[in-house]
Structure formats: structure tokens, C-alpha cells
Image: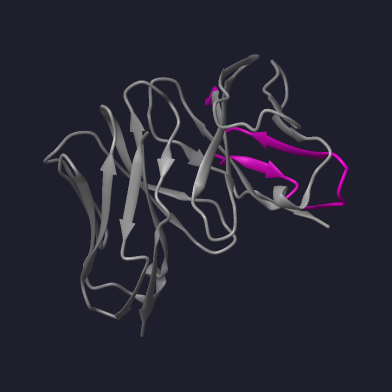
Amino acid sequence: EDQVTQSPEALRLQEGESSSLNCSYTVSGLRGLFWYRQDPGKGPEFLFTLYSAGEEKEKERLKATLTKKESFLHITAPKPEDSATYLCAVKESSGDKLTFGTGTRLAVRP
Amino acid sequence: NAGVMQNPRHLVRRRGQEARLRCSPMKGHSHVYWYRQLPEEGLKFMVYLQKENIIDESGMPKERFSAEFPKEGPSILRIQQVVRGDSAAYFCASSPPVRYEQYFGPGTRLTVT
């Protein structure tokens, strides 16, 4: 069965303090790894798709990377508006559903 | 370009009543997925539909839950005889053909009293 584990569960950063979130996965044939952002009371907002080890994607202060066993979401010089829960999900080669981790709750203090 | 639309946003039902949740996918998207998010838990897949077809319902509880995506109109997730344990946020997502990323709606928050 597919498994996705995210760490840490919660992270508090000072504005401008860069850090990384981790997503470890076990899947029989990865078809894609996805990062989403979720604000309280809202639906997940799509950020990135990564397909193969070594791939990187960037968007503003966020950069996602992928290896054969894990993905990192690097946040450079975060701002308070980056505060949210960041979700990681995988899609395996034999299906269409996404399997989600439980997320990392990020709080960025001004 | 409207995103995925869900209604109602909030739904309160008493135990034993029926809940109907509606989802209109993004324009051009023919694939619809339903997920459930329980308090303090992650999103869990329920069902994947295309127009008039259920493709994968492996995450759907065997009893009381059903889903459809008719030729015309929104996708419907139906929960019969609701119980307190059904209280959760239900999210719909859609994707276009031949693309892997799914785009989520704002969710319906179901409260069973």
C-alpha cells in the first residue's frame, strides 16, 4: 500500500528564515509527486508536479525537489503570507487517485 | 476561468437524514475525484468518476455512500442515513484528460448533529 510521510508536523519560522519540508514516500511505481498548499477552511491549492528523480520546480520562494525516496519543499526567505499547511501526495503507476500525507503546518512570524 | 465549484459550502444534517454534495468541475475537465478530510487527518480518496462512469470506488464505504457524474450536470456525492462519524470536509477535484494534477474545490463541510 502506498505510504506518504511528511515531516515535521509543524514548523515555526521567523520571517526570512529559510527551511525545508520533507515528504518520504513508498509507492510501487511513481507516476507523479504533487505539492499542494492548504489554507484553513479552504481546498488544497496546486503548487507543483514532479515526475522523476532529479527533477526540480520553482515558484516564487518555493522550490520542490525529488529523489527516488523523498521530496523536499524548500522555502527561501519566507513571509507571513506563506503560512499554511503544505501537503504532499503521490500517484502510482497503476491508478489515478492521490495518496496524501498529513501535511506540515507552517507558521511564519513577522 | 472558474475553478472547481462545490455546493453547499456548509451542510448540517441530523442523524438518519440524507446529505447531497454537488461538484462542478473546471471547464474542459472530464475527470472528477472525491476526497474526505476528517479532523486532524489527511485527505483520503473516495471515488473517481468520468462522465456516466465510476472508474475507481475503492475508497468509498460499502454502505450508505454513492456517487454519480451524469452526462449533464454536476457530480453528486450522496450519503444516506448520515451518522456522526460522517462529519468531515468533503473535497471534489477535477483534472483534464491526459494530465496528472488535480485541482480542488473549496469543499463542503458536513456536520451531523
Location of residue A39 in the rendering, given as x and y in whole percent from the top left corner = 50, 62
Q: Quadrant of residue B10?
A: bottom right
Location of residue A91 in the rendering, given as x and y in whole percent from the top left corner = 36, 32
Q: Nearer the viewer, residue B31 or B90?
A: B90
Labels in figure, total: 0
Screen quadrant of the N terminus of chain B:
top right
* Vertical arrangement, residue B1 with respect to residue A82, above or below: above
Residue A97 visible at all: yes
Scheme by which the image is coloured: one colour
Q: Quadrant of residue B78?
A: top right
Which residue is at the far left?
Answer: A54
* Vertical arrangement, residue A61 with respect to residue A14, above or below: above
Q: Nearer the viewer, residue B38 or B20?
A: B38
- Residue shown at the point (67%, 22%) measured from the top left: B69
- Residue shown at the point (40%, 57%) measured from the top left: A103
Relative to B24, A57 lies left or right? left
Relative to B102, B65 lies left or right? right
Location of residue A25 in the rendering, given as x and y in whole percent from the top left corner = 28, 43
- Residue B18 drawn in magenta: yes
Q: Nearer the viewer, residue A39 or A24?
A: A24
Residue B27 visible at all: no
Location of residue A74 in the rendering, given as x and y in whole percent from the top left corner = 22, 61
- Residue shown at the point (22%, 69%) measured from the top left: A19
* Vertical arrangement, residue B67 with respect to residue B40, above or below: above
- Residue shown at the point (21%, 47%) measured from the top left: A70
| Region in magenta | B1-30
- Residue A17 drawn in magenta: no
Screen quadrant of the C terminus of chain B:
bottom right
